[in-house]
Image (cartoon, rainbow, N blue to C red):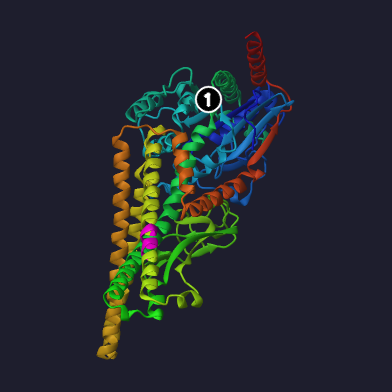
Amino acid sequence: MFAAGDKTTINLLLLGETGTGKSTWINGFANYVSFESLADAEEGGGEFPIRTTFMVIDPETYEDQMITTDKNVLPGDSAAPGQSVTQESRLYSFTYDGSVTVNVIDTPGLFSTEDDVCDNHAKDKEHVDNILHFIGRFDELHAICILLKPNQARITSGFAYCIREILRHLHESASENVIFVITNAKSTNFQPGNTLPTLRAFLAANSLGSIKPGRNNVYCIENDTVQHIVEHINGLPHDDNARRTAEMSWEKSVETTTKLLTYVQNLQPHKVAGTQCIYNTRRLIGILSNVLFDTVKCSMNNLEKLTDKKTKVTERRSEIQRSPEQFVTEDLRETLYTEIQKIEVKKLEHSNTVCKSPKCSEVVGNERHFKQVCCKKCKGFITLWMCSAFGGISGAKCKQCGCERGEHEWRATETHLKKEVLFDDSEAGIEKVLSRDDALSKLNAHCDRLEHLIDSIEKERNQMLQTGAIMSLYLQQNALLSATTSDNLGACLRNELAAFECESSKRHSEMVSHLSEFAKTADEKDTQRVIDEMNQDINDVINVKENLWKLINAYDDYYKKAGETGKVYTTLEVCSMIDELYKLARDGETLKTAVLQVERCQRLAIQNDDSKISVVIRKISNVWQIIKSKKRALMSHLTVW
């Protein structure tokens, strides 16, 4: 855990579209806090915590030339223009003599260039997931910096998606800590240009009036000073005009950075617990949507078995009452024997990457199975960035099955169906049933037990659906932007239904084709057997679909009723409801185990210290002096009060 409660620590989260210059801004910040002037930075070789490449024109040959911050061009540096530099969240921790620390969190650019052609934002969703996991290690954030380009005259789909994806995951109390950084602002004379009215219109149209862009929270910075320093250390000459331009950009950017840090230190830090609660609740919905589907489907099957068994027990009881001589001990054993299934979640000491695409699943009987394990004992962590099935962070498709990264899931548990026998008296116990009255007593007791169990299963199922509906409503009420329908448990169930229908339809088509060929050589009896099997399979599928629709309708009803009350659910109330789910007699432990395993996975990811890069400031600059003086002023103010 990276401590954030100390008054000497400032935590800045950088967010924005691909290409807005977050990584370059961090390199610029490193130079502003490390050197007094541009000349000092040139003489000292610059400070570049993030390795960066630039394509420039050789002033003598006019040929393209690639230069890097470490003066070492590598074969893989010829990346396509516009490709996002940052592929996973990283922390850059700037410290000087231990008195003040500025933590800058660099994040992947939202609206990835890889998603530009498919419009489903699969890569960006993974980025958001990665970001929210990453900030969970902090206690508080002092500023949420959204980087933008100058003169953005209209809301592009990428810009809109970027802002929505960021803000809808944040707790509403974060609005006071949102600031906007306009990069490459030299072209607009260090003014936001058309981006400001565009931004205001967007916020107003999306019910985000609590965020008011203005002089206090909009900062214009020029990043070209970083390239200037890199050109200098790579031996490229600059004429007087280029140098004057770079010095002006340096001075304006240092001044703006100082104002930004001064403003941030006057803000009340945003407690990450609020944001993380929203995200953890959404993660929990994702967990429950999967575990709940297995659990409820199992409960539906059990209810059918129990109802059928109750009918048989009742019929047998009536037969014995009508004709005492019909009583047979062995027949009683068969009537009383009751077997159901229970979901069991097995903890793995490793994780598997499983493909959930329709192509890689199959229907066996009335069950949909995800048979494709693309990476066993995967060490790719939750967001699959380092999963070997994708060849690291650059692979878009799985090398094992060819499906997109977004079709895969990182699992640390396995779900099994475990047999549970409700009545299996020993031979000696059955032999004690010597009379009609003994048999009726056994049947009556078992019938009562079946009724109690049916009622218990139905109540637990309804409680899970109701809690899932209220959790979705809680997200709607507490996020800055309303969550999309994909966050609703009902939508997850519908998606599962659609996938099952797709797979079952494909399977039935294959069966019909097989029957057509089979009938050419088989006799009438064998053909009828195959037809009977197909009909049974079709009936099973219809039954599963009907059960799924019952779940969906029940969920929708709970969601509608909860919304109509007008009640605003608090975090405490939602957490209390989740705790009640864990106490359910039959399925509570299953749900709790699944959630604990995901939390275990999160802790493993947090322990990956490779994401932290420390930058020790070698000599104090004007910017750093402002930070230290602000700290002294704050301490003095606290002393006076």
Q: Is 100 placed above or below 431 here?
A: above
Report helix, strand or loop for mark 1.
Answer: loop
Any magenta on residue 247? no
Q: Using a 10 Å C-alpha cutoff, classify the residue at mark 1 as few (fewer than 14 neighbours), some (14 to 19) or many (20 or more).
A: many
Residue 271 vs residue 108, the one in the foreground: 271
Image check: 528 left or right of 173?
Answer: left
Residue 116 vs residue 289, the one in the foreground: 289
Residue 469 vs residue 410, the one in the foreground: 469
> Where does label 1 land, which residue?
221
At 47% from the left and 53% from the top, the residue drawn is: 585
**Picture mark count:** 1
Looking at the image, can residue 459 be seen?
yes
Image check: 481 left or right of 12?
Answer: left
Looking at the image, can residue 61 be seen?
no
Q: Is 170 placed above or below 621 here?
A: below
Magenta stretch: give its range. Answer: 447-453
Image check: 284 left or right of 47?
Answer: left
Residue 16: x percent and y percent? 48, 35
Q: Quadrant of the N terminus?
A: top right
Q: Is 297 placed above or below 186 here?
A: below
